[in-house]
Image (tube, grey):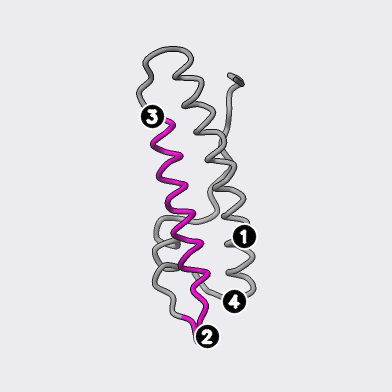
């Protein structure tokens, strides 16, 4: 497993902005902002959790580091999708 230092991608949304997106109601039957913000929020929570998760040994520590890195990458991908959705829907945060 990779043990290189990792800098997570910069966050695109604050906690307040994600909360705002959770509250948006649409004129059409589309809850994409709600669902995507919930996904990003969940990924953020697991990213933070896995960064500080207790490890029993070096292998366990390497696994938690992998989970942290991959979750941060997934969060960045979903944030990019949410950025595009916010632009498309002209949502002001």
- Which mark's residue is nearer the viewer, 4 or 2? 2
Q: Which residue is mark 2?
A: 28
In magenta, the rendered stretch is: 26-51
C-alpha span from label 1 to label 3: 27 Å
If you read the primary sequence from the N terminus, does the residue marked by circle 4 or circle 1 appear first?
1
Q: Position of residue 61 (x, y in %)?
A: 45, 19
**Secondary structure under the numbered disc 3 in the rendered image:** loop
Give yes or no for contact between labels 3 and 2 (Cβ–Cβ under 8 Å). no
Give yes or no for contact between labels 1 and 2 (Cβ–Cβ under 8 Å). no
Q: Which residue is mark 4?
A: 89
Q: Position of residue 63 (x, y in %)?
A: 50, 24
If you read the primary sequence from the N terminus, does the residue marked by circle 1 or circle 2 appear first?
2
Q: Which mark is residue 39?
A: none
If you read the primary sequence from the N terminus, does the residue marked by circle 1 or circle 3 appear first?
3
**Secondary structure under the numbered disc 1 in the rendered image:** helix
Q: Position of residue 53 (x, y in %)?
A: 37, 28
The one nearer the camera, 80 or 54, is 54
For the point 39% across and 72% down, the residue is 23
The one nearer the camera, 20 or 37, is 37
C-alpha span from label 4 to label 1: 12 Å
**Secondary structure under the numbered disc 4 in the rendered image:** helix
Left or right: where 90 falls relative to 21: right
Q: Which mark is residue 52?
A: 3
Q: Which residue is mark 1?
A: 81
**Secondary structure under the numbered disc 2 in the rendered image:** loop
For the point 58% across and 54% down, the residue is 78
**Residue 37 covered by magenta stretch:** yes
Left or right: where 84 falls relative to 29: right
């Amino acid at each position: 497993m990779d043990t290189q230092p990792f800098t997570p991608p910069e966050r695109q949304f604050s906690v307040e902005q994600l909360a705002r997106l959770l509250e948006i109601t649409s004129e059409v039957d589309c809850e994409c902002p709600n669902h995507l913000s919930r996904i990003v929020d969940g990924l953020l929570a697991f990213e933070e959790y896995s960064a500080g998760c207790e490890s029993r040994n070096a292998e366990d520590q390497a696994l938690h580091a992998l989970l942290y890195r991959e979750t941060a990458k997934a969060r960045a991908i979903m944030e990019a999708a949410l950025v595009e959705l916010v632009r498309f829907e002209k949502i002001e945060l």
